[in-house]
Each structure stands twice: as structure tokens, then as C-alpha cells.
Amino acid sequence: MSTQKRLLLTATSLLALLLFWQIAALWADSRLLPGPSEVFEAMIRATRTGVMPESIAITLARVAASFLIAMALGSAIGIALGRSVALNELVGPWVVVLLNLPALVVIILCYVWFGLTEVAAITAVAINKIPNVAVTMREGAAALSRDLDEMAQVYRLPRLRALRHVTLPQLVPFFAASARSGLALTWKIVLVVELLGRSNGVGFELQTAFQLFDVAGILAYALAFTAVVQVIEIGLLQPWERRANRWRR
Amino acid sequence: MSAIGIDIAEKCYRAPAGAPGREIFRGFCLDIGEGEFVALLGESGIGKTTLLNIVAGLDRDYRGTVSFGSGAPRLGYAFQNPRLLPWRSVLENVALPLPPGQEGRHRARAMLEEVGLGELADAYPERLSLGQQRRVALARAFAIEPDVLLMDEPFVSLDEAGAARLRDLLRRLLAGRPATVLFVTHDRREAVELASRIVVLEGAPVRIVRDMPLALTSTERASAARIDEVRRALGAAAPG
């Protein structure tokens, strides 16, 4: 299917959803289920006052910070575990425990221990994400090619050069997989963290809207933020993945 | 002084739990002179690749010594599988062991021209045929201008014509940049066609059952009858 055709199909599908929503809103005729136009108005209003762009920017900054920390630490831990059997036997179970700890528990503990601070918020999100990244990267590191390792050794490639040309490219698919699932997970958890212990950001605005039963406001924030995340995924993550996978047949 | 002095007191493969380990080498000695082309002949699985890996420094789990006449030689290794990086272009693969920068890329490109793959410089290895991938691996090995070249059945699983072309190429490359070569094969014809000395290996632990210098002229090497004659001579000494 051509890109154009696919875009057309997606657009049609989204339009159908919009239509369905409009019909449902007309039928319900309630403040609790506003139609697309009301949500759109709420979006414009919040944008005019500047609150929405600011909230989204703040939340995105938190997502970016915790995402980067989680990817870096999680990759390092995962690669170390994948390369060393002994280390994996020792520390592997901890990763499983962390993996199964509910996000909410981590958030509450972080706030209790470190106070209602920015550091606590970002730490909480990162800790939630690190085990996922570590587990995926561990798979990748365990599957590294010994043949290519030996080749790099025979030709005396300096460490950094070997890392860049031999090791890291083998980890790209695993990195991409954890980045993709990671972004989705991170921004969802960031909203919860904001709702529980921050006084700005999309999560905080959602809570305010919730207290006022302002469903239009809630939907406006949700849609705007989802759109931003989609733009990041399509504009940043997918092109990078395509570039990294150019060599595949 | 020899170019490579191999003296392996003991090399075993530890067997999984309980079973006795397999002894590959015990008191194995082989001296290779500067510029020699030694073909190691022997059945698969007796330890020829292990020997190359020991010489290459990839396998250090043995008792003994490997010494090089020139101290630390530049080492090229043509593996049985080409072992190219699939995510780097052909050119980048050849330039990989060279110092980064323009000069390395120039040298890599010249090397590719020499093996007849100049036009495929920007392709990715997986789009190439096996024979072409082997050429790239050869170009990579020669790009560093090796003092010692280790080759582990580098032409196996090619059709005869393809293998013959690669043998020609190897001879041509060596004529331009002489190196001491250790060439593992189980194909006698290949050994006779290329080598200046044939070492036949056998048994466990491995011992040398035949060590035969070959002084064939290039016209003799091109003659099928002469090759067959030497092959038969070799066969009489080492059946199988």
C-alpha cells in the first residue's frame, strides 16, 4: 500500500470515530459527554490562556528526563546482565521484583522518601521504566554474535570503535523496542506522578478538571497530549528506526 | 628465525559434566618460515580451526607458546564465514580495521577495486553472493597489509569455478603483498594449487603425519595432470 493511500485510510478511520463521537454526544445531550466542537473550544481556550502549552511543555520535559535516564540506566544494567552469567544470577531476580512492583507503589514510596519534589517525581517514573528496558536489553546482549566479537578482536579494533560498529548495531532492534514501549509507558506514568504530587503539568490540570467535573477540559488535554506524543513517535522514533534498519533486505 | 613458532604442550576441550574432556593437542610443534604458504590438511573436526584460533590469540585456554619472528605481527584472518558487519556498507567493512579517516577509506576503495568489487562499495553485504562476500573478507584481510594471514577454509561451499577464481585472486594478492600464510583446508587440490608446503594432520591428539615442501612453478600449478600427480603422492602417505 502506498503511503498516500495509508494516510487517507487512517484519516477516514479517524473521521468516522469523530462522527461516532458527535452522534453519541447529541444522543446523550449531557455536560458529561461533550461533543468534538465543545472539546475543541476548550482546547482553544486553554491554549489562549497559555496554560495548556505550558502544561504540555512541563510534562514533556518530565517525560524526556525520566525516559532518557531510564533508557541509559536500563540499557547499561541490561547489557551488563546479558554479558555476565554470574551477575545475572545475582541481580536478575531483583529486576523481576522491580518489574512486578506496581507503578503506584514506587511513586508513593518515592514521594514519601524524597518529598514532593521534582527529583522524586522523575526518579519514580525512571524506576518504573528501568526494569523493562533492562530485561529487553539483556535479551539483546545475550544474543550478541561471538563471531563478530572475535573478528573485532583479531583486527584489534579499539574498544570504542568496536562498540560503535560491532556491538551497538546488534542492539538497535532491542533498543528501539524498549524505546517505543518505553515512551508509551513513561508518559502515562508521568501523568499519575503529576496528579499525585506536582502542582503543574498535564496530570495536575487533569486533576483540576476532574474536581470540577469538566469533561471537556479532560478530553481536551488528553487529545492534545496524545497528538504531541504521536508526533514524537512518527517524527522522531520511526525515522531513526528506519535509518538504523536501512541495511536489512 | 621462523615467522611463526607454534608449541602447544596441551589443549583440551572440557566436556560437559562428568564426561572426559577431549584432548586436541599434546606436544604439538610447528615452525613456519617467513613467507611460507602452509596448507594444513586434515579431516573436519580434528582441531585445525582451534589451531588457527590459538595462533590468532582468540583461544588462550591452552598450555604452550606461540611466538612470532617479528614480535607483534599484523594479523589478517579470513574466517570460514565471511563475518562481515551486515549493517555497514562493503566499503565500511573493508575500512573497519584501518585507522578512521579519508586515507583509510581510500585504501579500502583501492583494495575493493583490486578484488573486483569497486562497484559494490556502497552495497550492504547481505545483498552480495557468498563468493562476493568472501572477496570482501579477503579485501579486509589484505587492507591491513598483514605479515601473517590466517585462512580457515575461506573458499568452501563455492562452486568449483568460483573457488578457482578466488584462488587466482589470492595468488595475485599475495604476489603484490607477500605474507606468511597458514591455510586450513580439507581439499587436497586446493592445498596443492596454492601451498608452498603441505602439512597433513591426523588423529586425536593431533599429530603431523606428513610435512611436504612443494616447489611447483606457476605453469605446473596450472597443469591439472601435475596437480593430480602431487595429490596422489599426498594420498599415498595419508589415506582418507
Image (cartoon, helix red, strand yellow):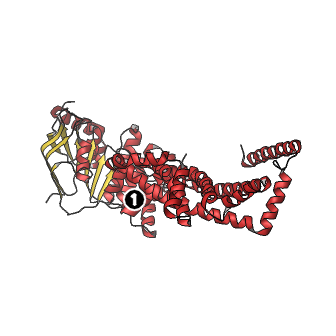
> What is the secondary structure assignment of the residue under circle 1?
helix
Q: Amino acid at mark 1?
A: Ala
Quadrant that contains the N terminus of chain A: top right
Q: Residue at x 53, y 63 (%)?
A: A120
Identify the image quadrant of residue B95: bottom left
Quadrant that contains the C terminus of chain A: top right
Q: Residue at x 52, y 51 (%)?
A: A105
- Position of B181 compared to A8: left or right? left
Residue A91 placement (x, y as % from top left): 37, 49
- Position of B41 compared to A82: left or right? left
Q: Looking at the image, which is closer to me, B193 or B127?
A: B127
Find disc 1 in the rendering and name its residue: A162
- Position of A27 compared to B112: left or right? right
**One can see residue A139 in this view:** no
Residue A158 placement (x, y as % from top left): 36, 63
B31 relative to B19, above or below: below
Residue B189 placement (x, y as % from top left): 28, 38
Chain under callout 1: A
Q: Looking at the image, which is closer to me, A55 or B84?
A: A55
Q: Residue at x 82, y 43 (%)?
A: A16
**One can see residue A49 in this view:** yes
